[in-house]
Amino acid sequence: MAGGWASDDAVQEQIDSSIEDAVARARSQLPKGESLRHCEECDAVIPEARRQAIHGVRLCVNCQAEHDRENAAFTGYNRRGSKDSQLR
């Protein structure tokens, strides 16, 4: 049950918005275009099987793993939430 000016399904709307934002962010990071033959970070050869499995691949497995570790630290917060919820 919501209180004040919020509707009864305001919490669910916040959850849905957070999920939609996360999905949009993930989709925006998918590789696009033609796969590279060499990694754009370290110039290592990208195996043919990887290039066929992931269309638009730009990084070798090692560089992609490092990139994924760096992005795992991302902690987004729901910008649509109330200011009180952002202060926690």
Image: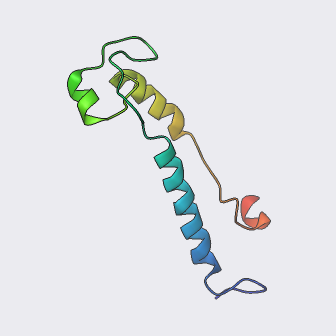
Residue 32 x, y percent position in the rendering: 42, 36
Q: Is residue 72 above or below residue 19?
A: above
Which residue lies most toward the left here? 49
**Relative to 47, is 67 above or below?**
below
Where's residue 87, x and y in %? 76, 58
- Quarter location, residue 74: top right
Residue 30, horizontal then vertical, whole percent: 43, 41
Query: Where, by quadrant of the figure, is residue 14 drawn?
Result: bottom right
Q: Is residue 6 left or right of residue 22?
A: right
The vertical placement of 13 against 19, above or below, is below
Residue 42, quarter of picture: top left
> Position of 69 compared to 8: left or right?
left
Q: Can the viewer see residue 70?
A: yes
**Which residue is at the far front?**
33
Which residue is more in the foreground, 54 or 75? 54
Q: Seen in the image, is 79 located left or right of residue 35? A: right
Q: Nearer the viewer, residue 6 or 32?
A: 32
Residue 88 visible somewhere in the drawing:
no
* Residue at (52, 62) in percent of width and height: 19
Q: Which one is in front, 76 or 16? A: 16
Q: How is the image coloured?
A: rainbow
**Residue 62 in picture, x, y percent from top left:** 37, 22
Please give the count of numbered marks on the rendered protein: 0
| Figure quadrant of the N terminus | bottom right
Which quadrant is home to the C terminus?
bottom right
What residue sits 44% from the left and 17% below the top?
40
